[in-house]
Image (cartoon, helix red, strand yellow):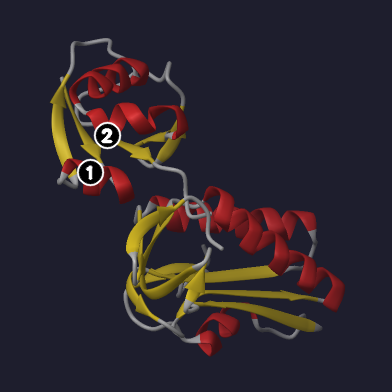
């Protein structure tokens, strides 16, 4: 059987390819694929202890059986719907804060909280030229939708929407917008904080800082 392996962030950069086809014996599991890739790719072996894996855009463990045609993504540490327009989106174009707020607005909203993350010109002691964001499209939006659902379950009546940029971002540009609406302000603030903190931990989006003295992939959004 053959599976497609997708690379992102530092793995894509180190291997020089976005994806590759790998032939495996029938009955192979995700762990078998990972062992094969570690033998054949030094960059993969170096990152292996910190990688997550997804099969057909669902997070999977090493004992997951693989089937012919599966899409397998190995995910480096991250930088940290409804009808109509989805609540959670990726975009290569500048983000519109008002459009994200509109996704959660409604008569039941006693308070709407927004978080807007922008590109700053300094990070970890380095002067930044620009940032580059890369995402696993499809899985990233699905994870953001799950986070929005979790917020609604934890704070009844809360509605959360998110938008994240990909590609190259200049200093001052908006990288992420979180909007949270709830009947009362305390729940809106709590849901917004939960959404951005959880996005940084779980959503497969990677950030590369390009500084005046070099560049590096960041293992959490700052």
Q: Quadrant of the N terminus?
A: top left
Q: Nearer the viewer, residue 83 or 135?
A: 135
Q: Give the mark, 1 or 2, whose residue is nearer the N terminus.
A: 1
Q: Nearer the viewer, residue 50 or 28?
A: 50
Taking the image as shown, residue 180 lies to the left or right of residue 182, namely left
Question: Is 100 rendered above or below residue 86?
Answer: below
- Name the residue furthest bottom: 98
Q: Residue 164's quadrant in the figure?
A: bottom left
Q: Residue at x 47, y 86 (%)?
A: 96
Mark 1, residue position: 14
* Label 2, residues with CA under 10 Å away: few <14, some 14-19, many ≥20: some
Q: Is residue 48 visible in the rendered structure shown here?
A: yes
Q: Residue at x 68, y 69 (%)?
A: 159
- Whole-angstrom CA distance, mark 1 to mark 2, is 6 Å
Residue 206: x and y, percent?
Answer: 41, 56
Residue 182: x and y, percent?
Answer: 77, 74
Whether pointer 1 and pointer 2 mark residues with C-beta atoms closer than 8 Å, the reply is yes
Residue 43 is labelled as 2
Q: Residue at x 44, y 27 (%)?
A: 49
Q: Residue 110's quadrant in the figure?
A: bottom right
SS for dot 1: helix
Q: Residue at x 80, y 61 (%)?
A: 155
Q: Is residue 184 visible in the rendered structure shown here?
A: no
Q: Quadrant of the C terminus?
A: bottom right
SS for dot 2: helix
Taking the image as shown, residue 85 lies to the left or right of residue 26, namely right
Q: Nearer the viewer, residue 62 or 210?
A: 210
Taking the image as shown, residue 187 lies to the left or right of residue 31, namely right
Question: Is 215 rendered above or below residue 12?
Answer: below
Residue 15: x and y, percent?
Answer: 18, 41
Question: Is 193 rendered above or below residue 26?
Answer: below
Residue 198 is labelled as none
């Amino acid at each position: 059987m053959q599976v497609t392996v997708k690379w992102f962030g530092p793995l894509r950069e180190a291997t020089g390819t976005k994806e590759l086809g790998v032939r495996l014996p029938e009955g192979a599991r995700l762990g078998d694929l990972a062992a094969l890739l570690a033998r054949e790719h030094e960059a993969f072996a170096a990152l292996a202890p910190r990688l997550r894996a997804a099969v057909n855009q669902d997070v999977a463990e090493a004992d997951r059986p693989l089937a012919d045609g599966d899409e397998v993504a190995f995910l480096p540490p991250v930088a940290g719907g409804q009808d109509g327009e989805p609540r959670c989106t990726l975009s290569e174009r500048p983000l519109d804060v008002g459009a994200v707020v509109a996704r959660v607005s409604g008569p039941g909203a006693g308070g709407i909280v927004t978080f807007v993350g922008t590109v700053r010109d300094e990070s970890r002691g380095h002067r930044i030229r620009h940032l580059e964001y890369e995402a696993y499209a499809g899985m990233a939006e699905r994870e953001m939708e799950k986070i929005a659902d979790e917020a609604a379950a934890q704070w009844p009546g809360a509605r959360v929407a998110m938008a994240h940029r990909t590609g190259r971002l200049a200093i001052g540009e908006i990288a992420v917008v979180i909007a949270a609406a709830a009947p009362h302000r305390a729940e809106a603030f709590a849901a917004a904080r939960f959404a951005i903190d959880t996005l940084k931990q779980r959503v497969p989006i990677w950030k590369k800082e390009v500084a005046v003295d070099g560049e590096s992939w960041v293992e959490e959004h700052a």
